[in-house]
Image (tube, rainbow, N blue to C red):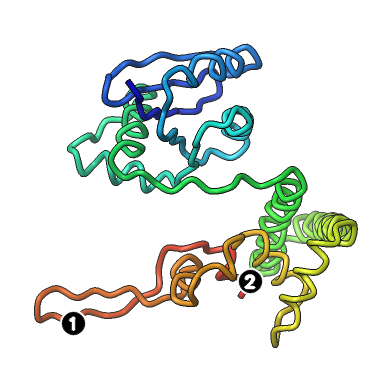
């Protein structure tokens, strides 16, 4: 009988839960665990596998499962937790989280999306490293007011290092972009828009891969610049901007 599979990815192991059978098992988070997972799951003929976005921890298992030809979706943590709370499940353990993902796969059925290739993953990693450095560069001058000379000197040294690190990342991003005709063509196309510079173009291309295949309203909702309604009955509440991909919104 086909079973939807929910995966809870942790540092030590991966917990799997099946729905509707209710079976649960775990494998170690290493090469042997990947092999066990790829060998065992296809026999279940799962219509969908769901796991939560956990950064680098989920990358290995996602790639292995996708290579094996299995339908897998990486979902936002909030989507899974809201679904669990809707069923009255408040406690969180690895086993509970795995069952919540299996429930999400069975009931919500999020749509599988193509996984990014190796070059896209590398570009996203570089851009992800650049974002906190930019945040620190912006915050540093505000922290200097009222500090003593020793801290000011240390902050200046760190500012020099930070500036060099950002420049290196920009060079790496530009080198990879120029090495790919497809990325170069898409980047040039996006930069034709008024006010769109290289940093904004890279951010949009990497963080909004579906851009151009959705309506402007859908894209605005993904970024988080579409006003959200707050209506109830005859009440007309305030429209507010929230959610979405904050780092894209910040750059825009």
User: Does residue 188 appear to the left or right of 226 in the view shown?
Assistant: right
Residue 33: image x %, image y %? 58, 15
Q: Quadrant of residue 221?
A: bottom left
Residue 25: image x %, image y %? 40, 14
Q: Which numbered marker is on residue 195?
A: none
Alpha-carbon neighbours of circle 2 within 10 Å: few (<14), some, or many (≥20)?
few
Q: Quadrant of residue 48?
A: top left
Please tell me whether residue 58 is drawn above or below residue 198 in the rendered image: above
Q: Quadrant of residue 127?
A: bottom right
Q: Residue at x 85, y 57 (%)?
A: 180
Give 235 or 179, whichever is nearer the viewer.
179
Q: How many marks?
A: 2
Q: Residue at x 45, y 14 (%)?
A: 26
For mark 2, what is the residue? 251
Mark yes or no: residue 208 visible: yes
Q: Which numbered marker is on residue 236?
A: 1
Answer with mark 1 or mark 2, whichever residue precedes in sequence.
1
Residue 3: image x %, image y %? 35, 25
Mark yes or no: residue 153 visible: no
Alpha-carbon neighbours of circle 1 within 10 Å: few (<14), some, or many (≥20)?
few
Q: Residue at x 21, y 44 (%)?
A: 86
Find numbered disc 2 in the image and state the secondary structure of the residue it sits on. helix
User: Does residue 81 appear to the left or right of 62 in the view shown?
Assistant: left
Contact flag, marks 1 and 2 (Cβ < 8 Å): no
Q: Quadrant of the N terminus?
A: top left
Find numbered disc 1 in the image and state the secondary structure of the residue it sits on. loop
User: Does residue 161 appear to the left or right of 229 in the view shown?
Assistant: right
Q: Residue furthest left?
A: 234
The alpha-carbon separation of the residues under discs 1 and 2 comes to 31 Å
Please tell me whether residue 85 is drawn above or below residue 206 in the rendered image: above
Q: Quadrant of the C terminus?
A: bottom right
Q: Residue at x 64, y 69 (%)?
A: 142
């Amino acid at each position: 009988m086909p079973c939807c599979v929910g995966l809870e990815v942790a540092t030590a192991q991966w917990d799997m839960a099946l729905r509707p059978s209710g079976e649960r098992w775990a494998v170690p988070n290493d090469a042997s665990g990947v092999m066990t997972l790829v060998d065992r799951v296809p026999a279940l003929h799962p219509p969908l596998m769901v796991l939560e976005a956990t950064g680098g921890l989920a990358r290995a298992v996602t790639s292995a499962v996708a290579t094996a030809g299995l339908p897998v979706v990486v979902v936002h943590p909030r989507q899974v937790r809201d679904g669990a709370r809707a069923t009255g499940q408040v406690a969180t353990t690895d086993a509970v989280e795995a069952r919540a993902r299996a429930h999400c796969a069975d009931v919500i059925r999020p749509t599988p999306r193509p996984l990014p290739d190796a070059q896209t993953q590398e570009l996203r990693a570089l851009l992800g490293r650049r974002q906190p450095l930019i945040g620190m560069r912006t915050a540093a001058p505000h922290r200097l007011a009222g500090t003593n000379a020793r801290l000011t000197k240390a902050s200046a040294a760190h500012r020099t290092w930070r500036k060099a690190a950002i420049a290196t990342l920009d060079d790496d991003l530009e080198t990879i972009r120029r090495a790919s005709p497809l990325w170069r063509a898409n980047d040039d196309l996006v930069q034709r828009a008024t006010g769109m510079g290289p940093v904004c173009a890279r951010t949009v291309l990497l963080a909004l891969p579906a851009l151009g295949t959705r309506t402007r309203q859908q894209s605005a909702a993904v970024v988080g610049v579409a006003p959200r309604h707050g209506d109830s009955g005859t009440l007309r509440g305030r429209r507010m901007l929230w959610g979405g991909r904050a780092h894209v919104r910040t750059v825009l």
